[in-house]
Image (cartoon, rainbow, N blue to C red):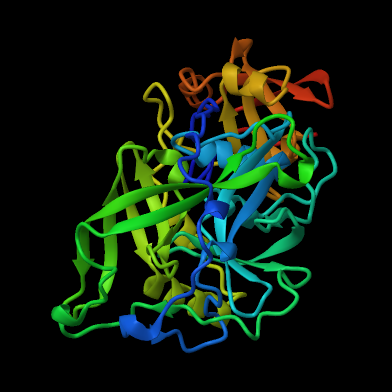
């Protein structure tokens, strides 16, 4: 639908950032014996270079994904609820800290990064931005011993929400002598299911936790571990395990993306969505299939699939999200609270992009402008309809904040644009 001020896919009221305190550790991962998986479980090894090699928690990594600039604004506009924000956050920077799993090639990592969609934001080609955006993503992978590695995003799988990362240098010096973990593959007979995949089975969950004050910076994060039991197992018609649900009193949203291990240390999967007391579990076989898709089509990133995963945009206060006429602007409506948190001087419409040869470009609007007022009325999500209510021939004056200076742009609706 054409609109006078089109906010394509980004027209959402900004949600306030929140912070959830991580749960305290139950058992230090390092306290457990390092055990490798056994062939006694009659599981089929994954047939590709993307197989987990070590069957214990040493392959569970910490992944830090920093969002800043336009990517941060894009995420804020689309996120329905704020996830955990760690103490590593700085002004205008948000850090996602989740678990990751090392793969056999020694440089690949699979992780469930909740806000990685922001990496696919097509940024406007302009230098007039309040928040300049770095062209390189900030992904840092941390081994359990504290060693850090820079990484880049290879691709994102919209079906599972998993991301494939690649480190710039090998994660491990030598892995040839380490045991191969087995993964639960397709089983036609439910009676032959591995002993791990039974209701009531206890799984181990590992996730990063911010260390206490006073620890060396190299060990700022450690892996917190809790136990949960399998409550429900979903299977396809052929008997393949497609999803499981686990329960534990200490489960919370902070465990989304945690690594799930069996009691013998073999890899079971990655936690999907999590809430108080329960969570979904993405089986390792499903992850294997996702990795193969990502590896085969690393350049085929479907932005449509990313958009389809999100709810339809709705303006706070019930105002329409698609005004009736098109002006060529794409942007985000910032509430006063969100603007303050981002360090902006005023709330309003943050212009992300101005379409070439559109009315907005003709009027002189630029990416990075913040439209503060319409005819002297402060622009908020609630009074958005003020801008679309003008009849043909009526005069409109936009109050704009540009490079910390306030200017006004006036125009008459439906009249030829003259500059």
Image vertical order of residue 267 relative to residue 130, above or below: below
Q: Quadrant of residue 252?
A: top left
Of the pair 72 and 180, the residue shown nearer to us: 180
Measured as percent of width and height from the top left, residue 238 is found at 19, 81
* Any part of residue 359 in sight: no
Which residue is painted at 42% across and 62% down in the image?
Answer: 261
Number of residue marks: 0
Which residue is painted at 60% across and 44% down in the image?
Answer: 96
Measured as percent of width and height from the top left, residue 400 is found at 73, 22
Q: Quadrant of residue 172?
A: bottom right
Q: Quadrant of residue 287?
A: bottom left
Image vertical order of residue 206 relative to residue 221, above or below: below
Measured as percent of width and height from the top left, residue 343 is found at 72, 23
Which residue is painted at 21% across and 57% down in the image?
Answer: 200
Give the left or right position of residue 229, taking residue 92 as reference. left
Image vertical order of residue 64 relative to residue 374, above or below: below
């Amino acid at each position: 639908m054409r609109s006078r001020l089109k906010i394509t896919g980004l027209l959402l009221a900004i949600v306030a950032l929140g912070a959830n305190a991580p749960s305290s550790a139950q058992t230090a991962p390092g306290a457990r014996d390092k055990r490798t998986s056994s062939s006694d479980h009659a599981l089929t090894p994954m047939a590709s270079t993307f197989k987990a090699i070590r069957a214990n928690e040493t392959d569970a990594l910490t992944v830090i994904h920093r969002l800043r600039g336009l990517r941060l604004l894009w995420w804020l506009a689309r996120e329905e609820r704020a996830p955990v924000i760690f103490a590593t956050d700085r002004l205008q920077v948000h850090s996602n800290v989740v678990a990751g799993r090392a793969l056999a090639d020694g440089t690949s990592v699979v992780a469930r990064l909740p806000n990685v969609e922001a990496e696919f934001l097509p940024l406007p080609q302009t230098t007039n931005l309040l928040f300049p955006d770095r062209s390189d993503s900030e992904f840092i992978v941390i081994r359990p011993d504290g060693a850090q590695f820079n990484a880049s995003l290879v691709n994102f799988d919209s079906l599972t929400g998993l991301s494939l990362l690649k480190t710039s240098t090998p994660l491990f010096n030598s892995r040839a002598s380490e045991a191969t973990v087995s993964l639960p593959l397709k089983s036609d007979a439910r009676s032959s299911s591995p002993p791990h995949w039974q209701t009531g089975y206890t799984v181990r969950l590992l996730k990063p936790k911010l260390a206490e004050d006073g620890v060396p910076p190299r060990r700022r994060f450690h892996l917190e571990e809790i136990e949960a039991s399998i409550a429900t197992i979903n299977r396809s018609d052929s008997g393949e395990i497609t999803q499981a649900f686990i329960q534990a009193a200490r489960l919370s949203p902070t465990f989304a993306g945690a690594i799930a291990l069996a009691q013998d240390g073999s890899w079971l999967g990655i936690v999907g969505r999590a809430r108080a007391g329960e969570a979904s579990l993405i089986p390792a076989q499903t992850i294997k299939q996702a990795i193969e898709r990502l590896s085969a089509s690393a350049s085929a990133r479907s932005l449509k699939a990313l958009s389809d995963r999100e709810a339809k945009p709705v303006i706070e206060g019930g105002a329409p999200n698609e005004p009736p006429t098109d002006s060529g602007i794409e942007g985000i409506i910032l509430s006063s609270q969100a603007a303050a948190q981002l360090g902006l001087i005023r709330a309003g419409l943050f212009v992300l992009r101005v379409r070439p040869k559109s009315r907005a470009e003709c009027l002189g609007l630029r990416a990075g402008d913040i439209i503060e007022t319409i005819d002297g009325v402060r622009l908020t999500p609630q009074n958005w309809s003020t801008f679309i209510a003008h009849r043909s021939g009526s005069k409109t004056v936009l109050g704009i904040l540009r490079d910390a200076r306030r200017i006004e742009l006036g125009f008459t609706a439906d009249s030829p644009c003259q500059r």
